[in-house]
Image (tube, rainbow, N blue to C red):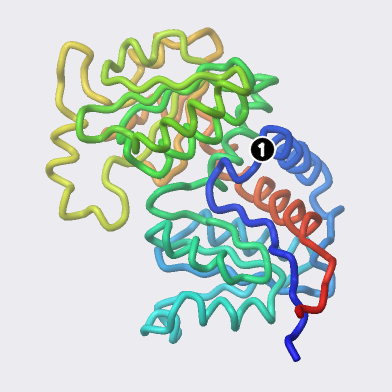
Amino acid sequence: MAGPERASPRHFLRDDDLSPAEQAEVLDLADATKADRFGYRPLAGPRAVAVLFDKPSLRTRASFAVGIAELGGYPLVIDAQATHFGRGETVEDATRVLGRQVAAIAWRTFGQDRIEAMASVSPVPVINALTDSFHPCQVLADLQTVRAARGRLAGLVLTFIGDGSSNMAHSYLLGGATAGMRVRICAPEGYRPDPSIVAAAARIAAQTGGGVEVGGAPKAACDGADVLATDVWVSMGQDEQSADRLAALGSTGPDGSYCLDAPKLALGAPGCVVLHCLPAHRGTEITAEVLDGPASLVWDQAENRLHAQKALLAWLLEHAPAQVKEAP
């Protein structure tokens, strides 16, 4: 006789896995959990959440571990390379083992295909804690940070300057468009976003009243921006490309380099704020003057990873299917 067949859980693998209304619900819950830090206990028991790491981490590791504990749960933090998961066991087999023991799984890994493979067989919610393609938990925290500082998201201009092919640029496109923001990606040729992600963001923006632009002129991209964001130019796993990346992004043309500096910040709209998901290289993708200046919200961003991820976990668990039916 076949065993019980469960409905598929909700996963958060990329930013557009949440509709505009759902994204707003998660952000509202993030504000609520921040205001009442120990008032939400959906993991009381404690129920465990597996947090897997294929890549080094500080902010992701700390915010998930602390957040799961504050939700009443047990953070099962696993360095994947120290397990059979890192020695050839398939993603699907490892997921089937974990899914019978935990309430949810968060994974910081490399290819997006890996986390999609996990979600395809997981009986519990799967959360993208970072892949090479997207960093959606970070952008939820960034949206929470901007909304607190500016009072709204819809209609604001968010400019990302630097490596437009990065996971942060991709997530800003999808997450920002979902929030109704006008997202500008400014990057040199060869470092532009995936066209399929730009197209997906444009379709979302057409529904939310947002906008999507991709270009290579820093001054034009920064002009009138409400939010200026950047990230490292050489991400994990790209060390062999370091020289080429630094040359392309640091080259000085008519508009200057792609470094987020004081002259570019001065082009922003009144009250313009600055984001960087950290760790930062002062003097490379951003100057110390800007990173440590009054427009910078980077420390609020880092803290809000905790609150946004707590809210996301609570929301996914609340929306997990409860019904069980017998398979024929």
- Height in image: 169 above or below 207? below
Camera-nearest residue between 215 and 41: 215
Quarter of the image where the C terminus is located: bottom right
Identify whether 82 is placed above or below 187: below
In the image, 116 versus 138, the foreground residue is 116
On screen, residue 258 above or below 168? above
Residue that protrudes farthest toward the bottom in the picture: 1
**Numbered disc total:** 1
Q: x and y percent of residue 311 in the render? A: 73, 49
**Left or right: 323, with 125 as reference point:** right
Point out the image quarter for the N terminus. bottom right
**Residue at disc 1, secondary structure:** loop
Q: Amino acid at mark 1?
A: Ser
* Residue at position x 37%, y 42% in the image: 280
Please state the horizontal and vertical placement of residue 249, each as a whole percent of the image: 21, 31
Residue drawn at the location 39% of the way across and 37% of the way down: 196
The residue sitting at 68% across, 38% down in the picture is: 23
Q: Nearer the viewer, residue 278 or 312?
A: 312
Residue 79 vs 144, above or below: the answer is below
Percent position (x, y) of residue 37?
Answer: 79, 50
Residue 228 x %, y % = 45, 23
Tell whether 290 sits left or right of 272: left
Q: Which residue is mark 1?
A: 19
Disc 1 packing (10 Å; few <14; some 14–19; many ≥20): some
Q: Quadrant of residue 119?
A: bottom right
